[in-house]
Image (cartoon, grey):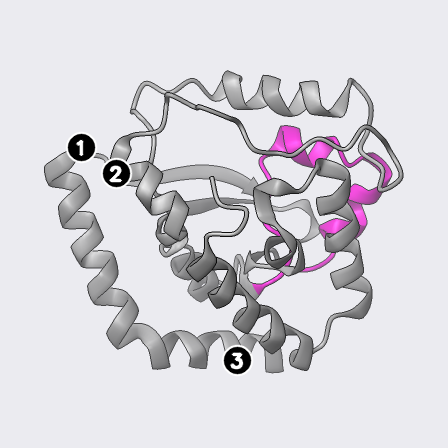
Amino acid sequence: MIKRLFDIVAILIFSPIVIPIIVIISLILSIKQGFPVFFIQNRVGKNSKIFKLYKFRTMEVSAEEDFHKSHYLDLSKGKNVDPSNSPLEPIRIENDDRITSLGAYLRKTSLDELPNILNVLKGDMSLVGPRPLVEYESKLYGEYNSKRNSVLPGVTGLAQVQGRLDLSLQERLYWDLKYIENNSFYKDLKIILKTFLSVLTKKGAN
């Protein structure tokens, strides 16, 4: 309850800053790359419940989802992801020509994730927690899947401040599980502060 209250209060406090930024970005996107402005995708939430995630659209409308899916399946080498698995390859997709020039900037600055606050207000997400995965990603975590989905997914998380897309699937799972086993209100605050530093330095961004 404290975590939920903190999420809502924090959003209300920063809404005078965040809402104008969302409006401005929406207007720029509509002018520069047309509609839709938002990208809406099914993600796996707490207790494996599926919800609609809101982000700014950073790719061409015709972008193929199968490209992303095949990339993640290749990284897993056809096996379920385990923190001890190897080799450890970064998650990022290099030279992804599906991303628009404006979308690339939004990703570098993490501004594409701002609409996630709608998911937080709806109760689908928290400010801090493991990032919500699409279904085919979630299935790769096998026996760890239920534990990873035992908490609300977050706008940011421990894995994000450790390197985001510079991490491998195994490393991301390791940090997600570490967060679930040791999370606290104090640690959530530290992760939020570290997130601001990661965004400023663009560490692990794609």
Q: Quadrant of the N terminus?
A: bottom right
| Residue 136 part of the magenta-drawn span | yes
- Residue on which the image places disc 2: 102
- Residue on which the image places disc 1: 33
**Please, what is the three-letter code of the amino acid marked with disc 1?**
Gln
For the question of whether residue 1 can be seen, the reply is: no
The reply to whether dot 2 and dot 1 touch (C-beta < 8 Å) is: yes
- Residue 6, disc: 3
Q: Is residue 35 left or right of residue 97?
A: left
The percent position of residue 80, horizontal first and vertical second, equals 82, 29
**Please, what is the three-letter code of the amino acid marked with disc 3?**
Phe
Q: Is residue 198 left or right of residue 80?
A: left
Nearer-the-camera pick, 55 or 164: 164
The magenta span reads 128-151
Whichever of callouts 2 and 1 sits on the residue coming sooner in the sequence is 1
Q: Is residue 121 left or right of residue 190?
A: left
- Residue 135, disc: none
Mark 1 vs mark 3, foreground winner is 1
The relative height of residue 82 versus residue 70 in the rendered view (above or below) is below
Say what secondary structure mark 3 lies in: helix
Whichever of callouts 3 and 2 sits on the residue coming sooner in the sequence is 3
Q: Residues within 10 Å of mark 3 (few under 14, many from 20)?
A: some
The answer to which quarter of the image holds residue 95 is: top left
**Please, what is the three-letter code of the amino acid marked with disc 2?**
Leu
Say what secondary structure mark 1 lies in: loop
Q: How far apart in space, not on screen, are marks 1 and 3 (Cα)?
A: 35 Å
